[in-house]
Amino acid sequence: MFAFTRNLGARLSGITARYASTATNAAKPTYTAPASVSVPAQFKPNIKGQGVMQLIAKEEVKRMGADGRSRLFNKSHPECLRPGDVVLVETLNSMSTDKTSTFVGVLIAMDRRGLHSNFTVRNVVLKVGVEMKYMLYSPLIKSVRVMKKGEGFRRAKLFYLRDNPGRAFRLEGLVKQDKAAQAKKTTKA
Amino acid sequence: MLQLKSILNVIDNSGAVWAECIRVLHGGQYARIGDEIVVVVNKAKSNAIAAASGVPKVKKGDVRHALVVRARKETLRPDGRYVRFDDNACVLLNKQGEPLGTRVLGVVSGELRQKKWMKLLSLAPKVV
């Protein structure tokens, strides 16, 4: 659909150029949105060799990843998440409130699936293991923060930690440190 | 995904330790977090403390209603999140549908955020 209109436009532009008046071309109206409206960044997708659904998916990933969350899954980025990192995920309770819930845990799985990209975080809460699977591009995710880089984890999926946790889920100290650090930040600012 | 014969931990102070599901009350085959089920108490603690606090003593073999509060099967939340716990747990209910015990001992799922279960949520030490 896109390709057709573009080619048609190219063919027509030569023909219509002779008939278009310079006055109408010059006075093209431009629209500037009022300050209260947030206009997402516009970009021209590369439509060569892509189906419509792939294009839509790519556009959505770009739109939802505008705040930079794609770097968390980008292996070439230094801030990429890796299995074994201790991660703090802050989630909005709903789209209409500013209240957040927090979940801390070890990242045990990352699935790269375009817009459906997700990661699983595991923690032991009151002696019961809890796993939360978050959708990376969910608008309800406020922030994903790495509290500690994982060391010595040599697998992409750390499901073995369910049976052999070792000392992987002793995270109370980290949480306390992080809280203190956050409190310091807010008092400084 | 709890059904007939599923065994759940009982995480209130009613005295029961674990219970076996014998019926899913909404009529389907599977119960999920927030569903009411009928259980048979398989193991109960000798509960002098519970008796003192006025909680009715639950014995082995008692048939009670219960509410599923944790499930090993991952539960989907409206925003696409999944929650999964390491065990299946329930809380015993009385005939009126209120919690039998006075305390909840462990994590409870946030799926219970309905008006009917707000009391349970307030009793729970941690809600995920």
Image (spheres, coloured by chain):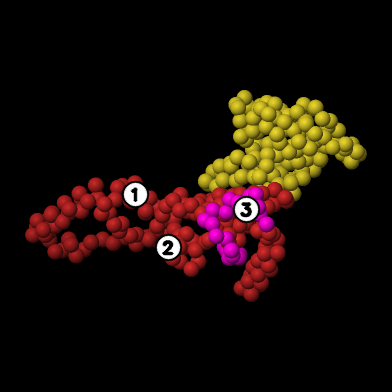
Label 1 resides on the chain identified as: A
Amino acid on which the number 3 mark rests in the picture? Leu
Above or below for A154 versus B37? below
To which residue does mark 1 refer? Answer: A54
Callout 2 and callout 3 share a chain:
yes
- Magenta-colored span: A140-166
For marks 2 and 1, the one nearer the N-term is 2
Instruction: Kindly identify which numbered label has been placed on residue A161.
Output: 3
Instruction: Name the residue: 8% across, 59% down.
Output: A18
Q: Relative to residue A47, is residue A41 drawn left or right?
A: right
| Palette colour of chain B | yellow
Q: What x and y, as percent, mark residue B1?
A: 61, 34
Q: Which mark is residue A35?
A: 2
Colour assigned to chain A in the rendering is red
Q: Mark 2 vs mark 3: which is more N-terminal?
A: 2
Q: Looking at the image, which is closer to me, A123 or B33?
A: A123
Residue B4 in sight from this viewpoint: yes
Separation (CA) of disc 1 from disc 3:
36 Å
Does residue A109 lie above or below B116 as drawn?
Answer: below
